Image (tube, grey):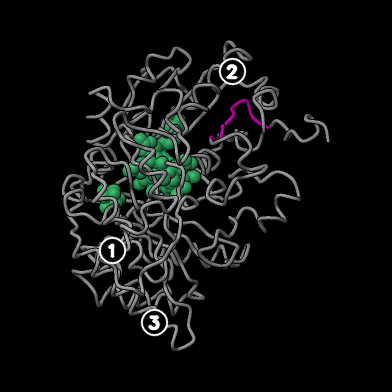
Amino acid sequence: MSLFSSRPKKQSNRLWLDLGDLGDLVHPGGPHEQWQDHGLGLLRTILKQAGVPTDLASTRAVTSWDQLAPQMAGYDMLLMNVRSYTYPPALKAARLFKQINPNGLVLTGGMHATVAPDEMAAVAEFDRICMGPGENVIVDLVKDPSAFPRVFSAEGAKSMAEWPTIDRTMWPQPVGWRMKRKWKWRWPMEPECGWGPGPVATIITSRVCPWQCVFCNENSYIPRIGRRSVDQVIEELNTLDRLYGVGSVVIHDSMFFQNPKWLKEWIEKYPRQTKNWSYWAAGRADTVRQWPDLFEALVKETNWRTISIGFESGSDRILKLLNKECTEEDNFFAIDLVNRIGDELEAKGERPPVFWSNIMLGIPGEEPEDAFKTMRMLKRMKRVMPSIAFYAPYPGSALGYQLIAEGKSLMSKDNYHRYPDDEKVKGVNYQFYRDLLAGKYDAEINRGLAPSARGAEAYQGALIKA
Ligand code: B12
Ligand code: SF4
């Protein structure tokens, strides 16, 4: 098939460009590259409903920039949701778009625009840079960009309840039947990734996590916004099931396990008013310890079977340094509780819950013994999918800003989006961590571990993009 015959018909003069690594929707390295962008989905839905449609292209749906270039020709406007990890393709796309359409405008927003506007303002190709939520400005901006200064702040909705339900057909399609078959894509639903059966519905019920971990602290740059109501979330899931079929759910909230009142209502309604699909969602070890009964009820009654916890480290020294506000004891409590619930459910013939365990290595200041403690903590989990990343200093976070200011970050304009085993901070001994993940220090790690927890597992495969 020629490039041009696969090109969607042009229906608008405005092009929204979905961002990610080249080829992620053609021959993805893994399932997570295939998740769809809710910011893009929401804003394109709002535009469509306001009678301001956009065409769509995706850097993920092509395998080279030469393939993307003809898809950009003839447009007056390019729109992009720029996150720090998609900044390099955003920059390249903006330059390419201007070469092809010298009079075209490039309008940007998103997390990177919000936390690093100066970096973007230094690039002439970005014509508008919107800091903050775009739902209330996107229509006016697209209709009349000249009414806005080059860099501006926008105010969002008071509550996510005001957001329209995303029209998922606004999302890019995976390319080619082989790829669709391999990953069992049922677009516009998302493919299965090992957490639950497909088709997968990703949803967001809340936006901001109130904690202040120094490597993240998103509430310093994402304004407070009310959570969607339980009824709305259930209504959306049931509608998706009617339209496309739902196999399982991924709740993409940074912090699902917050607001006990909301969670109690979820326990009341979700199992009764839906097919009680199993789901992935995130919590924290300290709140699991604070509200163990609520947690257990959620796991058992609402089928919360992939439990993402940002354990990050097994060492109090590092947890303090990260301002995680969780202790080694909190982590052990959560692990032992999930192990126990898992045993109980398994004994009844039910699927046990599994941890999606977020771990960071290579945190500046970490000593080998801290890392050994982290690996020991991981081995205490009976059922776990480890998600290990070398610490990455993203702008927006307190520690990220600090390391960038000190000139210690190895993540720069062209390589924000690094690969799992890339080096991200000066002065960190990455060879030690590679050896650690390859199992070189297992004897050391196993010392002091209960015999049942001793494994000779190597964890290189658990490294994720960060
Ligand atoms: C879901 C999610 C994911 C998912 C899916 C990502 C996807 N395909 O969309 C997964 C799990 C894959 C993921 C992975 C990662 N993520 Co993530 N993720 C999120 C999360 C929790 C929600 C994103 C979301 O959908 N938000 C809701 C939508 C509506 O918001 P939005 O996209 O920002 O869009 C709004 C505005 O930005 C603005 N806007 C957006 N575009 C535009 C365009 C214009 C023109 C305008 C005017 C406005 C505008 O308006 C929108 C509506 O308000 C956010 C945190 C958060 N609360 O947002 C982190 C977040 C975006 N992720 C982050 C990071 C760091 C990562 C990882 C690197 C983490 C890691 N260590 O693995 C990886 C990178 C993956 C990769 N390399 O490809 C950071 C980004 C920081 C930064 N400086 O950019 C965030 C902010 C979390 C954090 N606090 O650290 N992530
Ligand atoms: S790391 Fe997790 S708990 Fe900490 S601020 Fe970010 S989302 Fe919240």
User: Residue sitting at 30 percent across and 69 percent down?
Assistant: 335
Mark in front: 2 vs 3: 3
Q: Which residue is mark 3?
A: 343
What residue lies at 67% left-to-right and 33% top-to-bottom? 63
Element marked by disc 1:
loop
Mark 1 or 2, closer to the camera: 1
Q: Amino acid at mark 2?
A: Leu
Res. 409 image quadrant = top left
Viewer-nearest residue: 456 or 60 = 456
Residue 281 in sight here: yes
* Residue 15 belongs to the span the image colors magenta: yes
Is 288 left or right of 234, judged from the image as shown?
left
Distance from the alpha carbon under mark 1 to that under mark 3: 25 Å
Q: Report if the beta carbon of the residue with label 3 is closer than 8 angstroms to ligand 2.
A: no
Q: Which is nearer the N-term, disc 1 or disc 2?
A: 2
Q: Magenta stretch: residue 363 in it? A: no
- Disc number placed over residue 174 in the picture, else none: none
Tell whether 358 sits left or right of 321.
Answer: right
Name the residue at the bottom extreme: 348
Q: Is mark 2 within 8 Å of ligand 1?
A: no
Residue sitting at x 23%, y 23%: 406
Quarter of the image that includes the N terminus: top right
Q: Give the secondary structure at mark 3.
A: helix
- The span shown in magenta is 11-19
- Residue at the spot of label 2: 96
Q: Is mark 1 within 8 Å of ligand 1?
A: no
Residue 414 horizontal side relative to residue 282, left or right: right
Dot 2 falls on a residue whose secondary structure is helix
Q: Which residue is mark 1?
A: 447
**Circle 2 crowding by C-alpha within 10 Å: few under 14, some 14–19, many from 20:** some
Q: Is residue 410 above or below residue 240?
A: above
